[in-house]
Amino acid sequence: MASIKTSGPLKYYDGLKYETAEDFWCQTPILGVSASRDKVRLFTDGILHIRAGFTWNGASGPTVDTKTSQRTSLVHDALYFLMSEGVLSQHFRPIADQLLEDLGQQDGMFSWRGVVWRKFVNWFGGPAARHKRKVLTAP
């Protein structure tokens, strides 16, 4: 068999399953702070701009992806991404977690689900906000 040329080993991130098809923005209560990395930018007026091509993993933990969790998981993951990259303070985690609940309920999520989801990410989400994604290599 002939050797197939490649650029080298594949470098990839684990755990991402959705990609924005177009730009998306959301008004957040985070004011007076500017943070930007890759396809995510938070403006000082609280607007979170997520460019087309941003990938996120949807609902995490003991929950499932539904139509009512897509926008809220995108916004939450984008804010946690900025935190994990060190360009947004961990101080904003509770605000991001509350936004998760509020936006989910606005989108029709059962209120009990939003409350439970917020509590779980508040209790267990710290490592995701502090952890830089690990680059995996194959082969």
Image: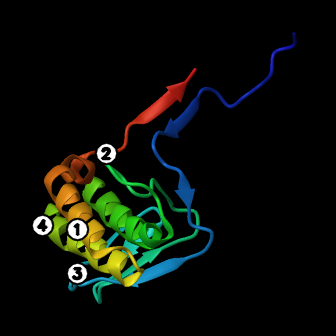
> Would residue 90 be found to the left or right of residue 52 on screen?
left
Q: Which residue is mark 3?
A: 30
Q: Are marks 4 and 1 in contact (CB under 8 Å)?
A: no
Q: Who comes first in sequence, dot 4 or dot 1?
A: 4
Query: Disc 4 and disc 1: Cα gap in Å?
Result: 11 Å
Q: Which residue is mark 1?
A: 97
Q: Who comes first in sequence, dot 3 or dot 1?
A: 3
Residue drawn at x 45%, y 43% as measured from the top left = 15
Query: Disc 1 and disc 2: Cα gap in Å?
Result: 19 Å
Q: Secondary structure at mark 1?
A: helix
Query: Disc 3 and disc 1: Cα gap in Å?
Result: 12 Å
Disc number placed over residue 132 in the picture, else none: 2
Residue drawn at x 31%, y 66% as measured from the top left = 79
Quarter location, residue 28:
bottom left
Q: Amino acid at mark 3?
A: Ile
> Would residue 131 be found to the left or right of residue 137 on screen?
left
Q: Looking at the figure, which quarter contains the C terminus?
A: top right
Q: Residue furthest right?
A: 1
In the image, which is nearer the foreground, mark 3 or mark 1? 1
